[in-house]
Amino acid sequence: MRRIDYLVTGALGQLGRAVLAEAQRRGRHAVGVDVQEMPLESRAAVHAVVAGQRPGAVVHCGAITNVDGCEQEPLLAHRINGLATGWVAEAAAAAGAALVYVSTDFVFDGAQPGVPIAVDAPLRPLSVYGASKALGEVAVLAHGRPDFWVVRTSWVFGPGGRNFPRAILDRARSGQPLAVVTDQVGRPTMTHDLAEALLDVADLRPPGGIYHAANEGSCSWHQFAVDVLRESGLGHVAVAPQLAADLKRPAARPAWSVLDTSALAAVRGRPLPHYQDALRRHLQLDDGAAAPPPPTNGPLRGKEYT
């Protein structure tokens, strides 16, 4: 008999905490692990934890998500995001557990603006981060299991820790000038809504393969910043336009990150809420306090990779 419903990796990250909270809300038994209990650098540790917990499903949120940092440490990025995801898939298969792997819009180059990116679009990452996550996708899908799913998402934000809305508000309230890029467009996605979608996949057991999960609607980062200020009563604060190239970041970002979410909406019977609705809920929850420890029914704790 299985001892837990879900094993959640990356449990101290914003998404991992949201997944554990959603599991708790559903009355399910979930255990969260992070680098201290299951260091992704160690294949033996990954196998030992998954075998020991015997979960019904592994929700693999653990990753290095510092996009620019990955450019500086490509071997580490590929080891954690790619190779270690393969180990998680191996361990889940050996334990007879389902697997939900959280991937990213960064596996695409965003070169076809105006057309939502289909789940079967060719992988063309522009960065080390995107390439490392694409490697993880290949490792998961290579098993060909009907209960292994890759769920790509985009522009994730949520209460606790660092997030885009808080960064915008902190800068606006300090009186510093604001300039945000206008030439990157995507779907902002709140961790709470994404967590619900991930567990729906684990529970509903649709055909194995790739799904896209993101809040409805799309915008540029500039428009998202304007939305954040308006919803916070700071609509009078000016946001200057800026081009992505002006930032001179180490890692290239896709200019178009609007994912086609129709396949997952059909499975769930509904899409995720609109990003503006998600933003309002986020602002009600995120008060700038330090992130709380993740809720969990298990004893495992640790520190996050990101």
Image (cartoon, grey):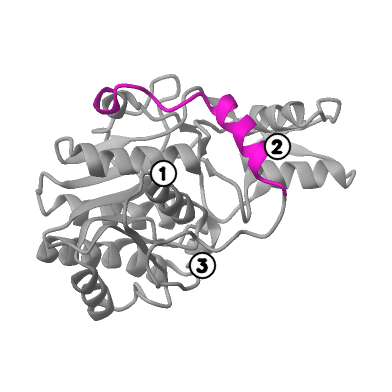
Q: Nearer the viewer, residue 27 or 180?
A: 27
Task: Give the residue displayed 24% in from the left and 64% down from the top.
Answer: 88
Amino acid at the residue labelled 3 = Gln
Q: In the shown orientation, is residue 150 left or right of residue 61?
A: left
- Disc 2 marks a residue whose amino acid type is Val
| Quadrant in the picture for residue 158 | top right
Q: Residues within 10 Å of mark 2 (few under 14, many from 20)?
A: many
Q: What is the secondary structure assignment of the residue under circle 2?
A: strand
Of tags 3 and 2, which is closer to the observer?
Answer: 2
In this picture, which residue range is highlighted in magenta? 266-287
Q: Which residue is mark 2?
A: 180
x and y percent of residue 244 in the render? 62, 40
Residue 179 visible at all:
yes
User: 276 above or below 180?
Assistant: above
Residue name at image x 36 percent, y 37 percent: 197
In the image, residue 92 lies in the stretch drawn in magenta: no
Mark 2 or mark 1: whose residue is earlier in sequence: 2
Q: Does 284 lie within the magenta span?
A: yes
Task: Tell me the CA gap for discs 2 and 1.
Answer: 28 Å
Residue 236: x %, y % from top left = 86, 26
For residue 179, side relative to residue 121 (left or right): right
Query: Label 1, on which residue?
Result: 195
- What is the quadrant of residue 180 in the picture? top right
* Residue at the (42%, 45%) spot, across then down: 25
How far is the residue under mark 3 from the one under mark 2? 24 Å
Structural crowding at the residue carrying mark 3, measured as other residues with C-alpha within 10 Å and reported as few (<14), some (14–19) or many (≥20): few
Query: Which numbered circle lies on residue 72?
Result: 3
Of the residues tagged 3 and 1, which is closer to the observer?
Answer: 1
Residue shown at 66% from the left, 27% from the top = 223
Q: Please determine whether, in this image, residue 185 is positioned above or below residue 36.
A: above
Quadrant of the drawing holding the N terminus:
bottom left
- Badge 1: few (under 14), some or many (20 or more) residues near its Cα, within 10 Å? many
